[in-house]
Image (cartoon, helix red, strand yellow):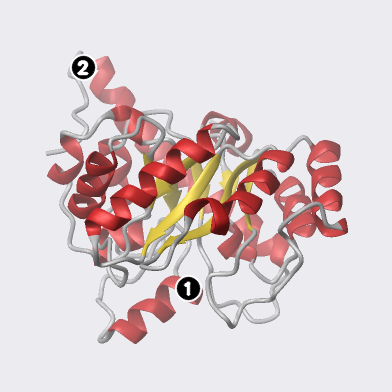
């Protein structure tokens, strides 16, 4: 199968962390030039080291981004990043972000759990889910081993406690495997929770400290298929045809963003094609592919 067909089948998206130096409209252009079908945009920076741009509200940059999306036909898959913290006030803190995302045509929101009080976090998540629903957006909890929502079990518990239909679970391989999850964690979860999936790779060897783990996850991952993470097992455990976004920031001094994006797309397509082939072999053998276990 050609790269183009694989990318289309997976509705392959370019996650912002892969080319974070670009402004939102330039990320859209990069995704289009590299052959992606979708893009994600970081409207709220995750760290103080990231560029501060006017990306909330009807700013000129946001209007330019909407024009770029319209001109290229690129789908805006998700917007980032909301954090549930002890001081979160959902409507006051997040509504302008939601309004901006709706104007741009986004569908999903990446949400991090940074509140150790799970009751309070669940209440805030439920409120966010209800508020976002009115804007046509869905919050997706992404478990990360260095946040308060560390793994799939904790994320599932938070979603269940929130008790709202408009919530998803976002799996990222580096966080999934560094968080010591096992595939059985995914088996009993509703397929409707898996609204999209991120893909990357990383060395087999675990980082020696939390600081090293954070550094690797933010700037020094590997392209899918070039590391030691069991991406095939994870892909076969996720419901088929789940849209995929590539979040693979790699250390590549001097390599232009569009070239890094193209390399990420091609390596991802090779992994996805192999996963499809394995899945099809099960179907040909009249043996159902189990999601996990």
Q: Is residue 222 above or below residue 71?
A: below
> What secondary structure is marked by label 1?
helix
C-alpha span from label 1 to label 2: 41 Å
Foreground: disc 1 or disc 2: 1
Quarter location, residue 149? bottom left
User: Badge 2: few (under 14), some or many (20 or more) residues near its Cα, within 10 Å?
Assistant: few
Q: Nearer the viewer, residue 80 or 283?
A: 80
Is residue 231 or residue 98 the one in the foreground?
A: 98
Q: Is residue 194 left or right of residue 153?
A: right
Image quadrant where residue 167 sits = top left
N-terminal label among 1 and 2: 1
The residue where tag 1 is placed is 218
Residue beneath disc 2:
285
**143 with respect to 265 (left or right):** left
Place of residue 254 in the rendered image (x, y in percent of width and height, measured from the top left): 70, 80
Q: Is 100 situated left or right of 45 in this image?
A: right
Instruction: Residue at 29% x, 50% y: name it.
Output: 122
Q: Is residue 241 visible?
A: yes
Identify the residue at horizontal 72%, vertical 42% (top origin): 104
């Amino acid at each position: 199968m050609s790269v183009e067909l694989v990318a289309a089948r997976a509705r392959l998206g370019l996650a912002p962390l892969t080319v974070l130096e670009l402004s939102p409209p330039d990320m859209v252009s990069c995704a289009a030039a590299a052959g992606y079908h979708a893009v994600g945009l970081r409207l709220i920076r995750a760290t103080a080291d990231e560029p501060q741009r006017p990306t909330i509200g009807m700013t000129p940059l946001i209007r330019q981004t909407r024009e770029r999306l319209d001109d290229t036909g690129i789908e805006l898959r998700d917007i980032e990043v909301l954090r549930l913290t002890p001081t979160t006030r959902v409507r006051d803190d997040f509504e302008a972000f939601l309004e901006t995302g709706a104007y741009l045509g986004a569908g999903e929101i990446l949400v991090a759990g940074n509140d150790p009080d799970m009751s309070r976090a669940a209440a805030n998540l439920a409120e966010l889910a209800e508020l976002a629903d009115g804007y046509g957006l869905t919050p997706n909890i992404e478990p990360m081993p260095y946040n308060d929502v560390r793994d799939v079990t904790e994320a599932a518990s938070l979603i269940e406690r929130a008790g709202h239909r408009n919530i998803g679970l976002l799996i990222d391989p580096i966080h999934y495997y560094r968080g010591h999850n096992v595939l059985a964690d995914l088996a009993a979860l509703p397929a409707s929770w898996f609204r999209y999936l991120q893909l990357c790779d990383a060395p087999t060897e675990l980082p020696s400290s939390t600081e090293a783990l954070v550094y690797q996850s933010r700037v020094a991952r590997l392209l899918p298929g070039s590391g030691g993470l069991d991406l095939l097992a994870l892909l076969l455990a996720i419901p088929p045809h789940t849209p995929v976004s590539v979040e693979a920031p790699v250390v590549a001094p001097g390599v232009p963003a569009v070239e890094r994006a193209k390399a990420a797309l091609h390596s991802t397509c090779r992994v996805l094609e192999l996963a499809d082939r394995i899945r099809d072999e099960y179907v040909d053998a009249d043996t159902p592919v189990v999601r996990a276990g």
